[in-house]
Image: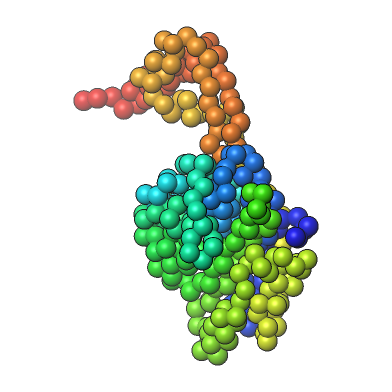
Amino acid sequence: MNNMKDYMLRAMTKDGQVRIYAALTTDTAACAKDVHQMYPTSAVALGRTLTAAALMSGTLKSEKSTITIQIKGDGPLGSIVVVTDANSNVRGYVHNPYVDILLNDKGKFDIAGAVGKGYLNVVTDLGLKEPYVGRVKLVSGEIAEDITYYYAASEQTPTVTSLGVLVGRDGNIINAGGLFIQLMPGCSEENISWLEKCVESMPPVTKLLESENSLEQIIEEVLPGRELIFLDTKPVKYQCNCSRERMERNLLSLGIDDLEELAADKKETELICHFCRTKYVFQPSEIDNILSQTRKENISEADENPKE
Ligand SMILES: [Zn+2]
């Protein structure tokens, strides 16, 4: 059991040809499990995806940028949605938190069976006009392999991905974490065969995390024989950015017909954040205000775009 706080680490080989991202996400995965009251299979699937997002956060530079991972499968889990910002604040949910299917023939949680067949979307929003959307077919549903395939197909970056969430017999999360190892363009044949050897003998990430070792020590253990440079670390947290204002904007975006329906009910309207389950209650008078605001905006829009 590793008692360190969650963090992610960026490193590279001294020649710059191999980039490494590592993350410890035990508390983050446990927090997600609590927030959504998930059964183990759902918790492992979301934990792996949150870990992938924490690793990807290492590629973001500007404060305002975000990456959203959407896994849309036809299995009992439904879709998985995870968001990270550049500060490694991650949040997410699975459509069905109550999936608890039997272990597969390797004695592991059958995540592929829970996810099913479908697509992986990665939406990178750098705060520019349009976000960049990469989409690949799910090749396995185990998530790590799908992320590897995404990097190969959509970003032309050969990537070794390892994601793990270890659950105890009591259903609690014992540890969670992950690794990305990426080959930069122009990587030498020598480095490629060195890395292949390292990966062949690499234990599962949850096994590596059983030690009290730091991510730095784990990377040195997994990638022997090259001088490594540790670039920076960031704390990883399960953190939502929802607010009453944001929820109000969601209501505004409903459109007049739906708002009129809500207003006609004359009841409290309750909205629950998908990511952190926080409840927001709007009184009938507040719904009326939002409705009249929408009506005004619609009128001014019509003024700006007069019909011929
Ligand atoms: Zn929230």
Is 269 in front, or is 1?
1
The total of numbered circles placed on residues is: 0
Do we see residue 125 in this rendering? Answer: no
Q: Residue at x 50, y 11 (%)?
A: 267
Q: Among all residues in the image, which is located at the extreme bottom?
A: 190
In the image, is 6 to the left or to the right of 306? Answer: right
Is 18 in front, or is 79?
79
Is 138 in front, or is 106?
106
User: Which of the colour schemes (rainbow, by chain, secondary structure, one colour) is used?
Assistant: rainbow
Q: Residue at x 48, y 64 (%)?
A: 105
**298 in relation to 266, above or below:** below
Q: Residue at x 54, y 63 (%)?
A: 107
Q: Residue at x 61, y 69 (%)?
A: 204
Q: Position of residue 42 (x, y in %)?
A: 53, 48
Q: Position of residue 77 (x, y in %)?
A: 45, 46
In the image, is 58 to the left or to the right of 122? Answer: right
Q: Position of residue 60 (x, y in %)?
A: 58, 58
Q: Position of residue 18 (x, y in %)?
A: 59, 77
The image quadrant where one finds the C terminus is top left
Q: Residue 233 is drawn in which quadrant?
A: bottom right
**202 in relation to 93, above or below:** below
**88 in relation to 252, above or below:** below
Q: Among all residues in the image, which is located at the extreme left?
A: 308
In the image, is 74 to the left or to the right of 185? Answer: left
The image quadrant where one finds the N terminus is bottom right
Q: Residue 22 is drawn in which quadrant?
A: bottom right
**135 in relation to 203, above or below:** above
Do we see residue 285 in this rendering? Answer: yes
